[in-house]
Image (cartoon, coloured by chain):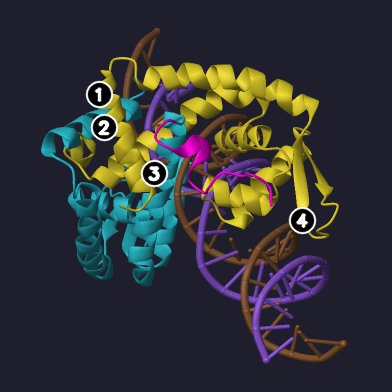
Chain colours: A yellow, B cyan, C purple, D brown
Amino acid sequence: MRKVPEAGEGKRGEGGYLGYLLRQAAAAYRNRAERALSDLGLTQPQFSVLTMVTAYPGLSNADVARLSLLTPQTANVIVVNLEKSGAIRRTPHAVHGRIQQIEVTEHGAALLAVARERIQALEGELTDDMPPDEERIVRKWLVGVAEGG
Amino acid sequence: MRKVPEAGEGKRGEGGYLGYLLRQAAAAYRNRAERALSDLGLTQPQFSVLTMVTAYPGLSNADVARLSLLTPQTANVIVVNLEKSGAIRRTPHAVHGRIQQIEVTEHGAALLAVARERIQALEGELTDDMPPDEERIVRKWLVGVAEGG
DNA sequence: ACGGTAATATCAGACCTCGGACATGATATC
DNA sequence: GATATCATGTCCGAGGTCTGATATTACCGT
């Protein structure tokens, strides 16, 4: 056979590109999250938007996009899929004719309650064997990267 | 107006879900990377695969999938797009009739040379104002998450 | 030699994500 | 009041990522 490194090794160990490690870590966590939510028919972004809309009822699609740091198009896809599955409802704004206000349905609230528990369990695994000061360092770094620093 | 948190704030500050922070950090970095490579017609995953194939010529699509921790289908999409743009070439394996071996073209090598510099500049920004021991903590955490721990 | 198992490539469908484009409605400027 | 500007929602296209499914080819045990 050819001499090829092991899966996950090569340039992908702790010495590789940080951007590469970041992408793989995010993909791996996303996989776990979606597997944990698959029987609920929820994806990770849908869980995220559902959480947000529950916390702040009446958001518009554009609001969701801004809060999620997503584009309006992307937010729209997620919102449409959540609406299709009956987790949320959209009604035209009373005053501003063009705005569609988003509300969580009872079905959506029930879904979120179950999903939240599972995600929090996964969250715990992320910091299981890590001292609090290290977790603080990781959080600070992630926020810094997200903000573009 | 309604009382709605600022973009990037709310549950998304340093106190929010780690999984959420991870997803946003990865998305933000990916955006920066793709903007840096956009005039080359390369995406972040394409850069990644191109780097890998350059390091280990003759890989098959299945090899790339294993090394990247991706599914063969996903790897195929990236490889097909790289082939379409002329950065790589696929030739049937001399012995194993079904395997398609991947090679970097001269065009691809030139592309990679330019792209690598830009990505390394971005890499530097990721650790700019961070002491080495913190970087080590972050790297260790990312690898742990990617490995499913 | 044969038949089962594994590996490879690939098709189809779904979702997330972006950039570009456009129409409509709200607001500000003159 | 007319016009410019901006916000909103939405359509289209491209790329990446997954599951599920299928055809072909290589390998191996009997």
Q: Which residue type does callout 4 highlight?
A: Ile
State the separation of the CA atoms marked 2 and 3. Answer: 14 Å
Could you tell me which chain the residue with mark 3 belongs to? B
Quarter of the picture containing the N terminus of chain A is: top left
Could you tell me which chain the residue with mark 2 belongs to? A
Q: Position of residue B86 (x, y in %)?
A: 36, 68
As drawn, A118 above or below A96: above
Q: Name the residue under label 3.
A: B25
- Which residue does the image show at 61% across and 44% down from the upper left? B4
Disc number placed over residue A137 in the picture, else none: 2
Residue B2 colored magenta?
yes
Q: Give the range drawn in magenta.
A: B1-15
State the separation of the CA atoms marked 4 and 2. Answer: 40 Å
Q: Mark 4 points at which residue?
A: A99
Are the residues under marks 1 and 4 on the same chain?
A: yes
Which is nearer the eye, B12 or B21? Answer: B12
> Circles 4 and 2: CB distance less than 8 Å?
no
Q: Which of marks 4 and 2 is nearer the N terminus?
A: 4
Q: Which residue type does callout 2 highlight?
A: Ile
